[in-house]
Image: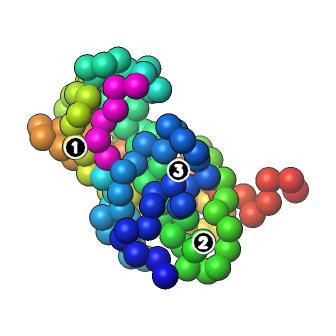
Amino acid sequence: MIGFDTPIAELLPHTGAMVLLDRLLHFDEAGVTAELTVRGDGLLFGDAERVPAWAGIEYMAQTIGVYAGLKAKQAGEPIRLGFLLGTRRYLGNVDYLPVGARLTVEAAKILQEGQLGVFECRIRGDNIDISATLNVFQPDDLHE
């Protein structure tokens, strides 16, 4: 059974510190919402006080990965690796994300045709509002 208490690490092909999301808030056919606390571990070129706002692209991509992971679990399939092809219209009202900030990341499916997908994403927090459209690709088999 897939529930909102399912650990994020079970839904992504990431391990350890590279799992940047903390928990699942919402999931349906139209999209997914996750939550995270900005970390000051330097993993995404930040420091103990702040992380560049462009790191939000990775937060968005992982949220889309959670969507794909949930869809795979529903179908009884394994979690597969996906790729970010590009980002359009990355708009934000901040240059940096403060360490410790609690953020909500939404990914709404605009288009999914076969292995290609387009998602409208948004990151929100206290005085933080970032949006972008992400194009993603998830191959059926990496070895073909």
For the residues marked 3 and 2, what is the alpha-carbon distance in whole angstroms? 19 Å
Query: Which is closer to the viewer, label 3 or label 2?
Result: 2
Q: Is residue 44 above or below residue 11?
A: above
Per the image, is 37 magenta? yes
Residue 118 horizontal side relative to residue 93, left or right: right
Residue 61: x and y in percent read: 48, 47
The amino acid beneath tag 1 is Arg
Residue under circle 2? 72
Residue for point 51% across, 70% down: 70
Residue 10: x and y in percent read: 54, 61
Sequence order check, earlier mark of 1 and 3: 1
Per the image, is 105 magenta? no
Residue under circle 3? 135
Q: Is residue 95 above or below residue 10?
A: above
Residue 62 horizontal side relative to residue 38, left or right: right
Q: Do tag 2 and tag 1 residues touch (Cβ < 8 Å)?
A: no
Sequence order check, earlier mark of 3 and 2: 2
For the residues marked 1 and 3, what is the alpha-carbon distance in whole angstroms? 25 Å
Residue under circle 1? 102
Q: Quadrant of the C terminus?
A: bottom right
Residue 41 horizontal side relative to residue 35, left or right: right
